[in-house]
Image: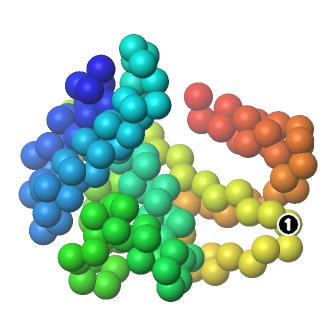
Amino acid sequence: MFVLGLLLLLVLHKEAFSTNFPDETIAEFSVNVYNQLRATGEDENIIFSPLGIAITMGMVELGAHGSTLKEIQHSMGYEGLKNGEEFAFLKDLSDMAATEDSHYVMKLVNSLYVQNGYHVNDKFLPLFMDACIFPCLFAPPLAFVLIVRFMSMFH
C-alpha cells in the first residue's frame, strides 16, 4: 500500500522535482508519514496524500509563529530552506497539478474553517494556496453539516 500513498508523487515526479525544492525533502516527508501511519495500524491498507498534507500544513504554517512555526518547519523538513521558500514550491506544485494542459488533471479544493470571531489574515491563503476562508461555529453537528455541504459541491 506504500505505492498508493506515494502515487501522487510518482505521477507528478518529473514536474514536481524540476523545481529548486530538494527532492529528498518530499520523499523523506512522505516516507515518514507512511511509517507513522503504518505504526498505528496492524495490517490495514494505507492511502494518504503527501501533497494534501503538505498544502494543509502550509496553510497552517502561514499563521504560525515562534516555536509552533519552528516545529512545523522541522516536521515538514523545511528547516534548511530560506524563509518562505516552501510556499512558492507548494503553489507551483498545486498549480501544476491542476493545470488543464497536463495529461493528469487534479481538482484541488483548499479551505480553512475558523471559529466565528477568530480573525485570519485573508491576504495569505488565496495568494499561496487558492484557499477560501469560512467562518464557522464548531458545535456539532452544524460544523460537520456545513463542511459536508461545501465539499459535496465539488464531487
In the picture, the quarter occupied by the C terminus is top right
Name which residue lies at 79% across and 39% down: 144
Q: Nearer the viewer, residue 10 or 57?
A: 57
Dot 1 surroundings within 10 Å: few (below 14), some, or many (20 or more)? few
Name which residue lies at 60% across and 35% down: 154
Is residue 135 in sight in this rendering? yes
Horizontal arrangement in the rendering, residue 81 relative to residue 68 (left or right) = left
Name which residue lies at 29% across and 46% down: 32
When asked about the image quadrant of residue 148, the answer is top right
Q: Nearer the viewer, residue 18 or 117?
A: 117
Image coordinates for residue 53, horizontal then vertical, percent: 43, 49
When asked about the image quadrant of residue 137, the answer is bottom right
In the picture, the quarter occupied by the N terminus is top left
Q: Tally the marks.
A: 1
Q: Nearer the viewer, residue 134 or 3?
A: 3
Disc 1, SS: loop
Image coordinates for residue 93, horizontal then vertical, percent: 29, 55
Horizontal arrangement in the rendering, residue 21 relative to residue 36 (left or right) = left
Look at label 1 and name its amino acid.
Asn
Horizontal arrangement in the rendering, residue 128 relative to residue 139 (left or right) = left
Q: Determine whether 37 is above or below 94 in the image.
A: above
Is residue 124 in sight in this rendering? no
Name which residue lies at 67% across and 32% down: 152
Q: Determine whether 73 is above or below 75 in the image.
A: below
Q: Which residue is mark 1?
A: 116
Specify how the rendered protein is coloured: rainbow
